[in-house]
Image: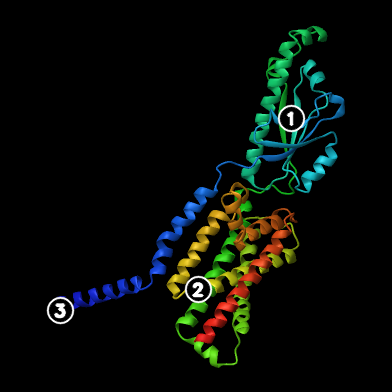
Amino acid sequence: MIVLQSLTRLLAFVGKELVEVVRRPGAIVSLILGPFLILAVFGMGYQGFRRPLQTIVVIPPQTGLPSDVQTYQSVSTGLQIVEVDPDPAEALQKLAARQVDAVIVAPADVENRFRSGQQSEIDVHINVVNPVDAAYASFLAGLLSSAVNEKIIEAAAEKGATYAFEAGQPTQIPPEVIAAPTRAKVVNDSPVQPNVNAFYGPAVLALILQHLAVTLVALSLVRERTTGIIELFRVSPISTWEVIVGKILAFGVLAALISVATVGLLVAGLHVPLQADPAQLAGILTLLTVAALALGLFIATISDSERQAVQLSLLVLLASVFFSGFVVAVEEFTPAVRIFSYLLPVTHGIRLTQDLMLRGWTNAGWEVYALGAIGGVLVLVTWFLLRRAMTRA
């Protein structure tokens, strides 16, 4: 008898939970279809190949080499030759301003060094802090050197033994120089060259900051809506704006403490460089926090339970990992998916935080305004929805 009573109570609990789930079809749809939708968008939007590096080729006038773009584009793999410039200083200035991705400086005396049995260096200048991008650029530099060597050997073969007879000493050219007249020398002009941990540290900071802000503020407002506290706000002199601003200020202080602690651990523990003024970094993290809190408040206004708010927060986290540039660069997505990426606050937070901490400056000033715009629009939408809810309460 006792066993049957216990079994009855257990089945009652099971039935109650199943009914609660069925009564919220939106939660089931978001829980099941949400991750698959994100994966489908990622699969359709990811192009599967890296963007060609925008490259300037520097050809000194005394070399006598061609100065047209087509000649060098035909032997370049993974490089988009944007111009051929005789002045290395101007090209390197554009590289420092991050207007191009690479600058290739051709040696001025390839033929004379080849005749004397010496290899020539092709200087490949890059300006990257991502260790994966640095390795990719080194790989492309090797392919470029091989293509140039092939052209030089082909030209030498057409002349037969002319080089040797003109030099008068046919045995002075070593076999390794004949096989590879040039070699690529990659020069990274970035102020710092961090390891993988140091590079991804600022990105993790931005991702954690957004997720904590979204989740905590969403749960707080949903709890007040489901427990009837919103009804008390309706009959009290508290306005909708005061509720929103109060939430942002309260959780903003908590996010600020988390930011300070995390930055301290990154700098002191993982030795992540901090190249920019800490006040600049604090300003970017503040904008990111406000935008994330506004996103969390918006999620709370469209959720009917804490469970749904948590699910939507996790979907935002999943989308942020896929589309924010944390794993795959935003430039590698199709334009349509790229627009979706730029709607996530963390996309701009990652870019700006990495630039400030690893470079000391950013050439993406528009992303600062984008963060502010995302936060402002979400606050206005949340105010409208919450005001309507408080009026109906």
Query: Could you say whether the residue bearing mark 1 is in a helix, strand or loop?
Result: helix
Q: Position of residue 322 (x, y in %)?
A: 53, 54
Q: Position of residue 360 (x, y in %)?
A: 75, 56
> Badge 2: how crowded within 10 Å, few (<14), some, or many (20+)?
some
| Residue indicated by mark 2 | 302
> Residue 70, which numbered label?
1
- What residue lies at 72% left-to-right and 56% top-to-bottom? 364
- What residue lies at 54% left-to-right and 89% top-to-bottom? 234
Q: Are marks 2 and 1 in contact (CB under 8 Å)?
A: no
The CA span between labels 3 and 1 is: 88 Å
In primary-sequence order, the first of circles 3 and 1 is 3
The CA span between labels 3 and 2 is: 45 Å
Q: Residue furthest right?
A: 62
Q: Amino acid at mark 2?
A: Ile
Q: Amino acid at mark 3?
A: Ile
| Residue indicated by mark 3 | 2
- Residue 125 placement, left or right of 384: right
Q: Position of residue 356 (x, y in %)?
A: 71, 58
The colour mode here is rainbow
